[in-house]
Image (cartoon, rainbow, N blue to C red):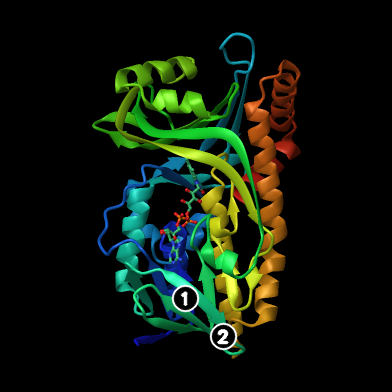
């Protein structure tokens, strides 16, 4: 039986698992990443990810940001639009400007396919990183000094620490007996790209009416036309019906729903439907095990938080591991993992609760709730300390 020795085993090569592998290896740590997708499988994820400043810093430390930057669109302004009245019209607009809290954009929007390519390219050049494609982790036995993981192909990996980046249905989480709370919103998100005559000027726009937020996030121009990625959250049946429309009809629906803010919108490229759930693991640590990314938390796509939280998990864990290594300590020891739990779980839980509240407010059908939402938005925007606090919370910085 083949036996592979490493310091860290990352189970899962989604964007989070690949980013974790690059970040660990760039810090000089020996790491193996295992994912069932065959080698060279083309990326098919039609989503884009808005990386906020702290996440960009982590990707930069991983040495992966330089390859993503040329295809990224800068986000200078977060615009929230309330249109929750009887008639479809703008009732309130609140702009949150990056320049008020920093001298850089809030973040950058990058297509997931490009993120994946950049991370894979980086891993090829990182001496300490090994990617095992077409394999999954089928079981882990933890011992006092190491963890032994079985792979589907029959090999065994011996590691000090196992990082579960195996997604929302994490089998490593379940095998470790870590509970999870999952809830449903009855929504789906329709994801696609549009071009428009009006330039977006680096403004990410989130429109709240009923049923869920509709977000247009800047992308680089396409064929000389301003372009944005769309995440349209709506009750499941409505989202499914929208996704069945042809491009012209979907473009017309979106033009009406965006109240002409961008001019007539033209759908470009393929689309995808994502079910929307919320989920939080009861804890992040098990014997020689750390949960990261969607294995730990899943939230609706509001305020670009999901993968940004995942990169914060990865950054925190990398620093703890680096510190332990420098002191010659065990990188899978219970106290290190308890420290990871203490540093990440409370922040994660409050962010999951915050996004849950925002989504429920955005879903609201009842008039009084929609009015409270509008007044709340206006207050947060007009009261300077609240506005700055909201921006810092959104960015994930203190
Ligand atoms: C519509 C939408 C828009 C979004 N937009 C944003 C955004 O703008 N900004 C943001 O920060 N976040 C965003 N998110 C969230 C973000 O896309 C997700 O957090 C992220 O894609 C999840 O990545 P992951 O690597 O954790 O999970 P996954 O992509 O699910 O990866 C898990 C991987 O583990 C593998 N795996 C499973 N079991 C095993 C096993 N036993 N052994 C080995 N491998 C295994 C799977 O095959 C898979 O490849 C959005 C989400 C949605 C739905």
Indicate whether 212 appears above or below 20.
above
Indicate whether 375 appears above or below 171.
above
Indicate whether 364 appears above or below 346.
above
Q: Is residue 264 visible?
A: no
Task: Place residue 197 in its image quadrant.
Answer: top left
Residue for badge 2? 325
| Residue ranking furthest to the top | 87
Decide: few, some or many residues near mark 1? Use Cα within 10 Å; few <14, some 14-19, many ≥20: many
Locate residue 38 relative to residue 139 in the image: left or right.
left
Q: Nearer the viewer, residue 131 or 305?
A: 131
Residue drawn 66% across and 55% down? 348
In which quadrant will I find the C terminus? bottom right
Residue 134 screen position, x and y as percent: 32, 67
Residue for badge 1? 9
* Disc nearer the start of the sequence (2/1): 1
Indicate whether 275 appears above or below 176.
above
Residue 397 screen position, x and y as percent: 64, 53
Residue drawn 63% across and 16% down? 91
Q: Is residue 200 visible?
A: yes
Q: Nearer the viewer, residue 42 or 373?
A: 42
Residue drawn 36% across and 69% down? 135
Q: Which mark is residue 268?
A: none
Q: Nearer the viewer, residue 146 or 92?
A: 146
């Amino acid at each position: 039986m083949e036996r592979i020795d490493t310091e860290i085993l990352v189970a899962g090569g989604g964007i989070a698992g690949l980013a974790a592998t690059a970040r660990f290896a760039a810090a000089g740590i020996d790491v193996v990443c295992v994912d069932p997708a065959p080698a060279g499988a083309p990326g098919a994820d039609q989503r884009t990810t808005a990386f906020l400043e702290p996440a960009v810093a982590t990707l930069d430390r991983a040495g992966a940001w330089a390859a993503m930057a040329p295809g990224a669109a800068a986000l200078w302004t977060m615009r929230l639009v309330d249109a929750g009245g009887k008639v479809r019209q703008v009732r309130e607009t609140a702009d949150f400007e990056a320049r008020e809290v920093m001298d850089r954009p809030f973040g950058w929007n990058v297509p997931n396919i490009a993120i994946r390519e950049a991370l894979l390219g980086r891993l090829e050049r990182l001496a300490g990183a090994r990617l095992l494609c077409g394999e999954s982790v089928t079981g882990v036995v933890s011992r006092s000094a190491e963890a032994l993981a079985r792979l589907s192909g029959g090999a065994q990996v011996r590691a000090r620490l196992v990082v579960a980046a195996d997604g929302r249905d994490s089998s490593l989480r379940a095998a470790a007996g870590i509970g999870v709370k999952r809830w449903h919103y009855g929504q789906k998100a329709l994801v696609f790209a549009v071009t428009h005559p009006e330039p977006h000027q680096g403004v990410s726009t989130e429109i709240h009416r009923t049923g869920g937020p509709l977000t247009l996030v800047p992308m680089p121009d396409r064929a000389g036309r301003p372009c944005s990625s769309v995440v349209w959250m709506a009750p499941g049946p409505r989202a499914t019906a929208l996704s069945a429309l042809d491009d012209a009809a979907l473009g017309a629906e979106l033009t009406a729903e965006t109240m002409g803010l961008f001019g007539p919108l033209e759908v470009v490229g393929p689309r995808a439907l994502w079910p929307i759930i919320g989920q939080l693991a009861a804890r992040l640590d098990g014997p020689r095990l750390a949960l990261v990314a969607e294995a730990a938390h899943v939230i609706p796509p509001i305020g670009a938080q999901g993968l940004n939280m995942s990169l914060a998990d990865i950054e925190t864990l990398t620093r703890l591991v680096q510190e332990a290594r420098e002191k010659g300590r065990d990188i899978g020891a219970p106290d290190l993992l308890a420290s990871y739990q203490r540093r990440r779980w409370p922040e994660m839980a409050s962010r999951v609760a915050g996004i849950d509240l925002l989504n429920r407010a955005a879903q609201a059908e009842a008039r009084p709730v929609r009015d409270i939402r509008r007044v709340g938005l206006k207050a947060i925007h007009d009261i300077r300390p609240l506005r700055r606090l909201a921006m810092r919370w959104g960015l994930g910085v203190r």
